[in-house]
Amino acid sequence: MVNFVYLIGDKQSRECVVVDPAYDITEILQIIDKDEMELTGVLATHYHPDHVGGSMMGTRIQGVAELLNQKQVPIHINKNETKWVVRTTGLAENDLFKHEGGDKIVVGDVSVTLVHTPGHTPGSQCFLVEQLLVAGDTLFLEGCGRTDLPGGNPSELYSSLQVLASMPTQTIVCPGHQYSSLPSAKLGDVVATNHVFKPTSQQQWLEWFGH
Ligand SMILES: [Fe+2]
């Protein structure tokens, strides 16, 4: 299971945010230091432990709680993910900045738009940065996130995938996991080749994927 951790920053102001810090918090902070950047926040795509830390299948994965011990920065989540993130990470609600879809976060001169994409989880969110779409587990280059884990909803995921598919075809999809040979690809190519875009209606989607 290869998880991607993304750093989004402004080379002029030297500020950056980290998307889904997990597994090796010390190494992530060292990379930021080496780049001579200053971490100003965490963006969390969703509550699963491989993205924000917590217990998974009997092992403890490092995540936002360990990061906060080393560096006090805001943790930006979608408001619908609050109780799930609290439960998984053990953080207090006060540690979390709860957002609506459409909110923007500014990193120096770089603007990040939060796109609420429920389905994999209730408060899953993607991040749009210029032409890049950081998609979390909502959309992979091949396939999409599961809907059979707590909080998953196949109908909502269908609608969220339609929202992503309507973005400009030149948008680069940067998924939460490497479940394909390429790490990223143009949205137009993903929509053309990914089987999750084959159903032509929500009803057909639910027949194929609604379990
Ligand atoms: Fe997930």
Image (cartoon, rainbow, N blue to C red):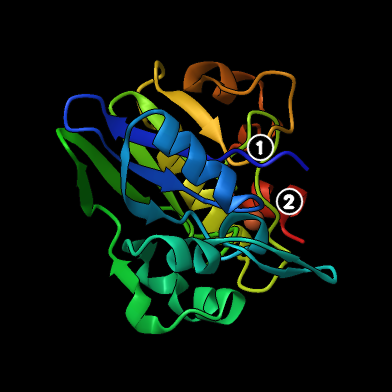
- The residue labelled by disc 2 is 209
The correct choice, above or below, for 164 with respect to 148 in the image is above
Q: Could you give the CA–CA distance between mark 1 and mark 2, rounded to whole angstroms?
A: 8 Å
Question: Which quadrant of the figure shows ligand 1?
Answer: bottom right
Amino acid type assigned to the residue bearing label 2 in the image: Phe
In which quadrant of the rendered view does residue 139 lie?
Answer: top right
- The residue labelled by disc 1 is 196
Q: Position of residue 28 (x, y in %)?
A: 53, 43
* 1 and 2 marks in contact (CB < 8 Å): yes
- The one nearer the camera, 202 or 51, is 51
Disc 2 is placed on an element classified as: helix
Disc 1 is placed on an element classified as: helix
Which disc is residue 164 wearing? none
Instruction: Please identify the quadrant where the N terminus is shown.
Output: top right
Amino acid type assigned to the residue bearing label 1 in the image: Val
Q: Is residue 180 left or right of residue 170?
A: right
Can residue 123 be seen by looking at this rendering? no
In which quadrant of the rendered view does residue 5 lie?
Answer: top right
Sort mark 2 into few (<14), some (14-19) or many (20+) by Cα contacts within 10 Å.
some
Instruction: Please identify the quadrant where the C terminus is shown.
Output: bottom right
